[in-house]
Amino acid sequence: QVQLVESGGGSVQAGGSLRLSCAASGYAYINTDMGWFRQAPGKEREGVAIIDGGATYYADSVKGRFTVSADNAKSTVYLQMDRLKPEDSGMYFCATPRRRGWPTWNPEEFDIWGQGTQVTVSI
């Protein structure tokens, strides 16, 4: 059925950039509404960015530095991360929302998750 695969993570120095990709596959997946979350060791999972019906939303901590976009033809959602900071480090996950047109930061409202891609930002 539907599966999500994140890629693009890696290790960069502060101030650097990374572009994460979330590729969706499966016959049941027909849109690219997506949430991006991250989780650092010992920390709670937090919402980073959401794209829903073309509208985008960002956590205050990343606003102005991160950009989420979608390529529906490729069933892929991207997270462009610029001017990275050490506090941006963590495992980044993409997830599909249960309802389109109802954007939310609540992880419980996302039903399908990828395995994550690691982002490490060093000083």
Image (tube, helix red, strand yellow):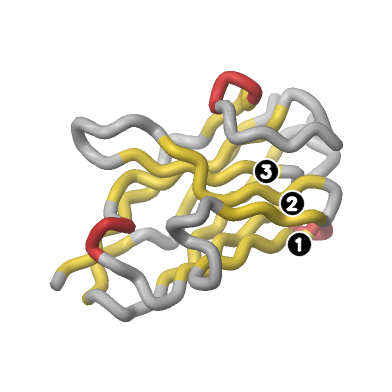
Badge 3: residue crowd in 10 Å (few <14, some 14–19, many ≥20): many
Mark 1–mark 3 Cα distance, whole angstroms, equals 12 Å
Tell us which disc is closer to us: 1 or 3. Answer: 3
- Give yes or no for contact between labels 2 and 1 (Cβ–Cβ under 8 Å): yes
**Closest to the observer, 3 or 120:** 120
Residue 40 versus residue 73 in the image, above or below: above
Query: Which of the labelled discs sits on residue 34, or is there none?
Result: 3
- The residue at 67%/43% (across/down) is 34
Q: Quadrant of the C terminus?
A: bottom left
Residue at mark 1 = 71
- The residue at 80%/27% (across/down) is 99
Residue 123 versus residue 41 in the image, above or below: below
Q: Quadrant of the N terminus?
A: top right
Count all numbered tags in the image, as a single digit.
3
**Of the residues under marks 2 and 3, which one precedes in the sequence?**
3
Mark 2–mark 1 Cα distance, whole angstroms, equals 6 Å
Residue at mark 2 = 75
As drawn, the residue found furthest toward the left would be 123
**Of the residues under marks 1 and 3, which one precedes in the sequence?**
3
Q: What's the amino acid at mark 3?
A: Met
Badge 1: residue crowd in 10 Å (few <14, some 14–19, many ≥20): few
Q: What's the amino acid at mark 2?
A: Ser
Tell us which disc is closer to us: 2 or 3. Answer: 3
